Structure formats: structure tokens, C-alpha cells
Image (cartoon, rainbow, N blue to C red):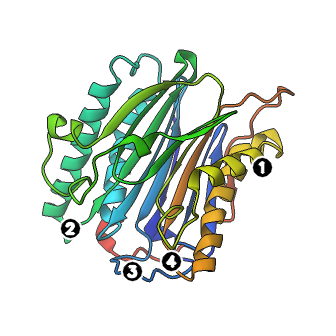
Amino acid sequence: MRSALLRGREHLEIGVADVIAEGPVAIALSMGGAKKTYIHTDPNEDSVLFAVGSAGILAALADGHRGFEASEVVLEHLLAHPGPQWVEPGGVTPASWERHALAAICDANGEILRERLDTEMGRSCTTLSLALVLPESDALLYACIGDSHLFQVRSDEVADLAKANPVTGIDCFLGYTRETPETLAEKCLIGTERLEDTRAVVLVSDGLSEVQIGVEDPASVVGECIEMARKAAPGRRPLEAARSIVEAALASHRKNASGDNVCAAVVWLENDPTGSPARAGIRDRGAARPPAPRSHRQR
């Protein structure tokens, strides 16, 4: 399994987006295009990851609230435990997805609560959006809790799958309270879609869409960024898409003189008509990495 994780506490430069790509997937993260004007705990509380295996691609992002810790704990848990299983053959199927997803999310929630007991961690909690792409099974498996986005970009529409979740509120965060698979089933949106005619799957935090901070029409912006990325060299399309989505958010932050952390993940699915292979292991525009704000999350 090949993987990468971008942690917000390591990216503390306004206006800079760090991007990592591996084959058909890319992730991007920025502190924002302007300073936050709302009450917050840490400068950058978002985290984003990908994991690539022989059977599938996992992408996930977490938008932390009241601190960066919860977003890191959740993604580190996914990367260490279910992730390696999910992206290899036989790990998960559309039929077993809901059970797998609820178990993983419940375990991740418990991990946050245990970390809180063991450290000086405050009341940090987090959203979570994750997508598992299984090309051989023609399946997109996804799960969302909170207000981060998950777009399925087809040739004729850009659908925000996470927007269908009618459940909102402060308790719809991981790390807020103890949960069971049954209680999480009432708060999470878990589903499957076919990949047919899908150009890309895009996850992005609400730094793209926050009222009076982000863009007015997130789905249109995502669609435009995917369309522009289609003009890039085949090996750079996921990277260019992830970067342009984050940079669109940064431009809106500057325009509104109010910023927010923003991260994105792009899984590129459209075939290259020339048959050119994707380039692996690309890193672009890396931001400076000052010491982490709190030592207890150093790993």
C-alpha cells in the first residue's frame, strides 16, 4: 500500500497549498487564503490522506473543530487499520460496506476519546468524509459525517453526495460523545454508487463553501477545476485538479478578507485516450513546516 497524510499543524503558511499525487489520486491542503476571522483553537485543523492498493483507492479528509487533534487521530486510525485491508482484494464489497464503514468510524471515534484521556487534548472533534474507489467492482463506496463535501463528477453533472445527509448539529462530529454503530448510523451518510461515466471523485472541506468565506457554488467550481485539469498532461491531472480546487478557495478567502483551512482529495477515473501512464509520487508547492503547535501529537 502506498499512502500519504497531510496534517494541518504542519502547514501554517497563508496562501500556500501543498499537494501530493500518487498515480490516479492527489491530496492538497492549505491553511487558507486569509486569516480566520472567527473564533478558533489552532491555525490549521484540517487533515487529508490517500492510500493506494492493488484493488482500490481510499481518500479521506477530516475538518477539525476546537483543535487539530481529532482530525489527525481519525485519519491515522483509518490509515493504520481498515485502510490496508480495504484497498486490497477481498477487503470489502458494496454489500458489506455499511458494516465495515460503521465499525471503522465507531473505532475511530473511540480512538479520539481514548486520546483525550491520555493527553492534554481538549474537546477537539471532527467531521469525516471518506471515499473508497474499487475500479474492478465498478463501485464508489462512501461515508460522511458533518459538513465536508464528497462530489461525484460525471460528464453531465457534479453531484455532492454528502449534501444528501439531513442530519446536522453539534453532535454530528466524531469525538463529541461516545458512539455505537447503531447511533452512528443515524448521523452518518453511507452509500454506494457505480463508477460508470465518472470522471473524478472529489472530497473537499468546507473551506471551499463556508458562507462569506468560500465560493458561492462549490459544485460548479469543482466541475470547472476538473474540466481544466483534463487539459493537463495525463500524469498531472489529479494533482492539477486538487491544487486548483484549493486555490479557488484561497482566491475566495482573499476576496472576502476572511479565511478558513481547506483540503481536498481527487481520485481521477477518466481514462487517458493516449494510454499514457500516470506519474507516481509527485509533490508540488510544499509549504514550510514549523514545529507542531503541541508536542503530544508528534508521531
* Residue holding disc 4: 290
Q: Residues within 10 Å of mark 3 (few under 14, many from 20)?
A: few
Q: Which-is-in-front pick, marks 2 and 3?
A: 3
The image shows residue 26, relative to residue 136, as above or below, that is below
Q: Is residue 109 left or right of residue 161?
A: left
Q: What residue is shown at x 33% (from left), y 38% (from top)?
A: 189
Q: Is residue 80 left or right of residue 227?
A: left
Q: In the rendered structure, which disc, 4 or 2, sits on the residue that comes first in sequence?
A: 2
Mark 2–mark 3 distance (CA, rounded to whole Å): 18 Å
Between 288 and 67, the residue placed more toward the observer is 67
* Residue holding disc 2: 123
Q: Secondary structure at mark 1?
A: helix
* Residue holding disc 1: 228
The image shows residue 10, relative to residue 194, as above or below, that is below
The image shows residue 95, relative to residue 82, as above or below, that is above
Mark 1–mark 2 distance (CA, rounded to whole Å): 40 Å
